[in-house]
Amino acid sequence: MSCQPVDRRWHSTLSDGTRIVLRRLESRDAGAVVDLYETLTDEECYLRFFTPRPADLKGWAISLVRESSDRYALGAFDGTVLLGVANYIGCRKSGDAETAVVVAHNEHLRGVGTALLRRLGQIAKDNGLHRLVADVLAENHLMLQMMSDSGLSCTRHLDGPIMHVVIDLDTA
């Protein structure tokens, strides 16, 4: 599995007409990732991490933006402001990658997450992956709707409070 070059940039237009830039996150973006997470409410953090707040947010952000052949973190930017992040951590053997998406508190319902997931799906496919998988709390209706809105082929399986979502990249 290889990863696309760091300097690739894509543009997307949000539902309100705002043009944003999507690009791979780099080590210099760790502070912006922390700033984004600090905009989240306790409930939003719980829906993302299944816990109120990560114990070491700065350390987590540094690991998220660390470049590696089996992981990719994509950021959505309006100018220099980070609006959202989508990432995957892949497994070469299975062709699967665990994925997650988060959007800053005041940026919900504008299409940021949908743009991120669509582009991340294409990047993952280009990097030899076949499926993105995610465990989402069943109560996280915004995330589940965003996955449906992405236009990617999704299957879901409810297991207690967790919705297991599989996005098939081979049909994309």
Image: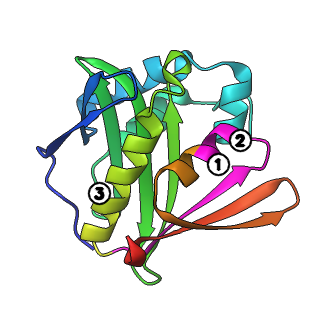
**Residue at horizontal 52%, vertical 15%?**
106
Element class at badge 3: loop
**Residue at horizontal 57%, vertical 53%?**
148
105 with respect to 8 (left or right): right
Q: Is residue 72 visible?
A: no
Element class at badge 1: helix
Range covered by the magenta-colored residues: 129-145
Q: Are marks 1 and 2 in contact (CB under 8 Å)?
A: yes
Amino acid type, callout 1:
Leu
Residue at which label 3 appears: 68
Q: Position of residue 71 (x, y in %)?
A: 36, 58
**Residue at horizontal 37%, vertical 73%?**
129
Residue at which label 2 appears: 141
150 with respect to 7 (left or right): right
| Above-or-below relation of 51 to 78 | below
From mark 1 to mark 2, how far is it between C-alphas? 5 Å
Q: Nearer the viewer, residue 141 or 23?
A: 141
Q: Quadrant of residue 139?
A: top right
Q: Position of residue 158 (x, y in %)?
A: 80, 64
Element class at badge 2: helix
Residue at which label 1 appears: 144
From mark 3 to mark 1, how far is it between C-alphas? 28 Å
Please state, as top left, top right, bottom left or bottom right, where the N terminus lies in the image.
Answer: bottom left
Disc with the residue nearer the chain's start (2 vs 3): 3
Amino acid type, callout 3:
Ser
